Image (cartoon, rainbow, N blue to C red):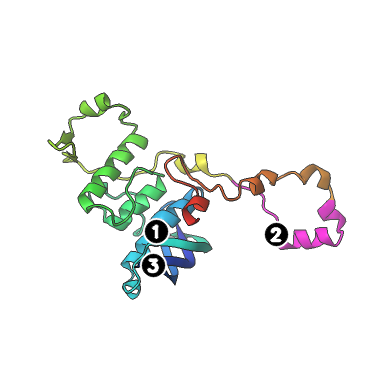
């Protein structure tokens, strides 16, 4: 399976009480099952960095509050047939694998790390996967009431009554449909352009406006309606 090996570093805040904050640096490398980069940045910010910090025994003296700033220092495609969540039963996944599942298929309804029990985490991940990937209709309360594998408790909570395995699989051409390849310019292009290389300035008038919208929206990094932008999260 093709996975992404990601390296990140940055600084997080630790509230010490009475309005006081401390800042602690971090640096982690981890793999995710999504084989393309589209949409991963918000998941890294909201899911993987907090998970790594909260599970890092070296950081136990400074409790995680929020990410102050971070950068992705490296992304590399690697082949790993054991580490991927593809082909695994969602009902048996651990908490890291559930976060990986949420990132892989952009399941924004899946709770963030360390906010609920593993049973609840699996249930909500299973429902999100069924709705988006298996196309099971769950748009209205009536739709949900007709699903026999959902059992509601008297307090309004629910549990899933599923005996079969729910295997995480990728629909045909799923990632190919959302991957966008761009022709990016290397550093030498800009050096040549500054010093008047004709090859670099050819058709310049036709291309000057390319990417202008990128700078207008540089801080709007939201990956979906359910997640705020990175700019809002880090402000």
Q: Nearer the viewer, mark 3 or mark 1?
A: 3
Badge 1 crowding class, 10 Å Cα cut-off, few under 14, some 14 to 19, many 20 or more, is many
Viewer-proximal residue among 62 and 130? 62
Whether residue 106 is visible, yes or no, is: yes
Image coordinates for residue 163, horizontal then vertical, percent? 16, 41
Please say if 203 is above or below 75: above
**Dot placed on the residue nearer the N-terminal end, 2 or 1:** 1
Which quadrant of the structure image shows residue 150?
top left
Residue at the image position 35 percent from the left and 49 percent from the top:
101
The numbered mark at residue 186 is 2
Q: Residue 182: within the magenta?
A: yes
Whether residue 37 is visible, yes or no, is: no
Is 29 left, or right, of 231 in this rendering?
A: left
- Residue labelled with disc 1: 48
- Residue labelled with disc 3: 14
Helix, strand or loop at mark 3 = strand
Q: CA distance from mark 3 to mark 1?
A: 17 Å
Residue at the image position 18 percent from the left and 36 percent from the top:
156
Helix, strand or loop at mark 2 = loop
Please say if 99 is above or below 144: below
Badge 3 crowding class, 10 Å Cα cut-off, few under 14, some 14 to 19, many 20 or more, is some
Viewer-proximal residue among 181 and 61? 61
Residue at the image position 26 percent from the left and 56 percent from the top:
94
The numbered mark at residue 177 is none
Image coordinates for residue 119, horizontal then vertical, percent? 20, 49
Position of the N terminus by quadrant: bottom left
**Dot placed on the residue nearer the N-terminal end, 3 or 1:** 3
The region drawn magenta spans 181-201
């Amino acid at each position: 399976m093709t996975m992404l090996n990601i390296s990140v570093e940055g600084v997080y805040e630790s509230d010490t009480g009475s309005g006081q904050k401390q800042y602690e640096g971090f640096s982690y490398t981890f793999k995710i099952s999504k084989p393309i980069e589209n949409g991963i940045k918000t998941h890294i910010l909201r899911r993987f960095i907090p998970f790594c910090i909260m599970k890092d025994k070296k950081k136990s003296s400074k409790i995680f509050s929020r990410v102050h700033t971070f950068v992705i220092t490296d992304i590399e495609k690697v082949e790993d047939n054991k580490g991927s969540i593809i082909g695994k039963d969602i009902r048996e996944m651990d908490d890291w694998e559930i976060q990986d599942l949420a990132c892989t298929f952009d399941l924004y309804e899946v709770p963030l790390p360390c906010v609920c029990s593993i049973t609840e985490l699996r249930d909500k991940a299973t429902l999100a996967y069924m709705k988006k990937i298996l196309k099971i209709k769950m748009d209205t309360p009536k739709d949900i009431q007709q699903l026999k594998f959902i059992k509601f408790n008297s307090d309004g909570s629910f549990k899933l009554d599923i005996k079969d395995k729910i295997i995480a699989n990728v629909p045909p051409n799923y990632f190919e449909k959302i991957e966008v390849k761009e022709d990016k310019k290397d550093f030498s292009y800009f050096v040549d352009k500054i010093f008047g290389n004709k090859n670099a300035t050819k058709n310049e008038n036709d291309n000057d406006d390319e990417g202008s919208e990128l700078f207008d929206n540089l801080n709007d990094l939201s990956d979906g309606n359910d997640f705020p932008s990175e700019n809002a999260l880090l402000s």
